């Protein structure tokens, strides 16, 4: 049987559209599984997307995010590099490639750190080139500038220049960045001014000022800020946690701190909020400061049960044996 060219063209287009639809459906299934925290399922689904498919780069990126969440930074870097090589115009791929390399560098020997440094710096710079408002990449570069030696591109001057650029995009975030830079320079007065300015521009960021005071062991100022915030909204569980944490760190207001942490433990944290593992660890700190070793041991044990990698809980267990 003979077919016209138009008919054959129609068949080819139809088959092609079905193939694309299947690939997109597979990607969406993988995304949904990842967003539902079904990471093993997501990995199986996304691994089926071949490198000749249009969704391959995005699949590699999500696989990288999964590996990053699992703290497998070597694999994450490989996935992000593949994603950015496949689609070099996506700023997120470059940004997360830099993030993965940065985490690898933390535990690497000096020689490997020297090899990784220019790659992570270039990745964040590329992300900003593609998206000038990419805040994560800008903040990562500030971290780089303030920690890397000068011969590898480290520079407080460059860090401050970046903070000034951030102020043009997000004034409050720019003040925060400048405050962190001054803090690392041990210019405490200048840092405090920046954090105060940050809180004035965006009152929602006032916890950053409280954290600064806590780092300076000006605990009463930190308590005053958090307590005032809790008066405004007693359902703000982030503030509840921070009050508990502040008691654990400072050794002050221990009874209230215990109460706050128990309240937080009755709450289900959302994504990016402090975990129950962290709350149990801080509760252990409070019991330890109160001299209740048995209760401290139990709290540390619960923390480690939820997250075996909680370093401070491990250290606490050693102290209360």
Image (spheres, rainbow, N blue to C red):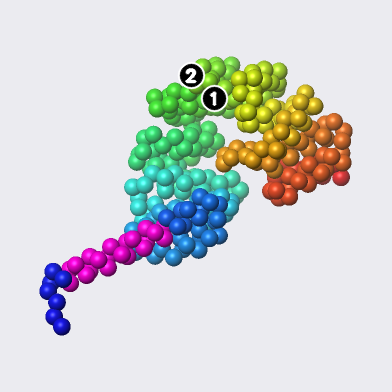
Q: Is residue 280 above or below residue 52?
A: above
Residue at the spot of label 2: 201
* Towards the viewer: 126 or 280: 280
Q: Is residue 255 above or below residue 18?
A: above
- Please give the name of the residue rendered at 87% of the width and 39% of the height, measured from the top-left corner: 293
- Please give the name of the residue rendered at 79% of the width and 27% of the height, measured from the top-left corner: 254
Under circle 1, the secondary element is helix
Residue at the spot of label 1: 205
Region of the chain picked out in magenta, as a range: 8-27
Residue 122: in magenta span: no
Q: Is residue 313 above or below residue 263?
A: below
Residue 162 visible from this viewpoint: yes
* Towards the viewer: 305 or 216: 305
> Circles 2 and 1: CB distance less than 8 Å?
yes
* Towards the viewer: 111 or 137: 137
Q: Work out which quarter of the rendered image holds the C terminus and state it.
A: top right
Instruction: Assess disc 1: are there few (<14), some (14-19) or many (≥20) residues with their C-alpha within 10 Å of its C-alpha.
Output: some
């Amino acid at each position: 049987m003979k077919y016209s060219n138009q008919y054959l063209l129609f068949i080819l287009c139809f088959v092609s559209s079905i193939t694309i639809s299947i690939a997109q459906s597979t990607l969406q299934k993988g995304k949904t599984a990842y967003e539902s925290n079904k990471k093993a399922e997501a990995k199986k689904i996304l691994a089926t997307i071949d490198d000749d498919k249009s969704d391959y780069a995005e699949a590699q990126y999500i696989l990288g995010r999964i590996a990053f969440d699992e703290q497998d930074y070597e694999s994450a870097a490989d996935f992000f590099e593949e994603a950015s090589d496949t689609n070099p115009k996506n700023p997120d791929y470059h940004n997360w490639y830099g993030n993965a390399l940065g985490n690898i560098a933390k535990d690497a020997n000096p020689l490997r750190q020297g090899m990784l440094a220019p790659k992570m710096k270039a990745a964040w710079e590329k992300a900003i080139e593609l998206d000038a408002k990419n805040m994560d990449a800008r903040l990562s570069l500030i971290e780089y500038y303030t920690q890397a030696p000068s011969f590898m591109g480290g520079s407080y001057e460059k860090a401050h220049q970046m903070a000034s650029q951030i102020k043009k995009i997000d004034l409050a975030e720019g003040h925060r960045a400048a405050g962190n830079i001054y803090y690392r320079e041990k210019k405490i007065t200048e840092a405090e001014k920046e954090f105060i300015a940050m809180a004035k521009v965006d009152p929602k960021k006032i916890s950053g000022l409280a954290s600064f005071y806590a780092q300076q062991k000006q605990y009463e100022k930190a308590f005053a800020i958090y307590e005032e915030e809790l008066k405004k909204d007693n359902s703000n569980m982030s503030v509840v946690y921070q009050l508990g944490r502040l008691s654990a760190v400072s050794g002050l207001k221990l009874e209230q701190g215990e109460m706050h942490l128990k309240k937080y433990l009755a709450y289900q944290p959302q994504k990016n909020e402090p975990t129950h593992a962290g709350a149990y660890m801080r509760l252990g700190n409070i019991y330890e400061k109160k001299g209740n070793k048995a209760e401290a041991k139990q709290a540390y044990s619960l923390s480690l049960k939820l997250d075996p990698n909680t370093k401070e809980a491990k250290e606490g267990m050693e102290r209360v044996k």
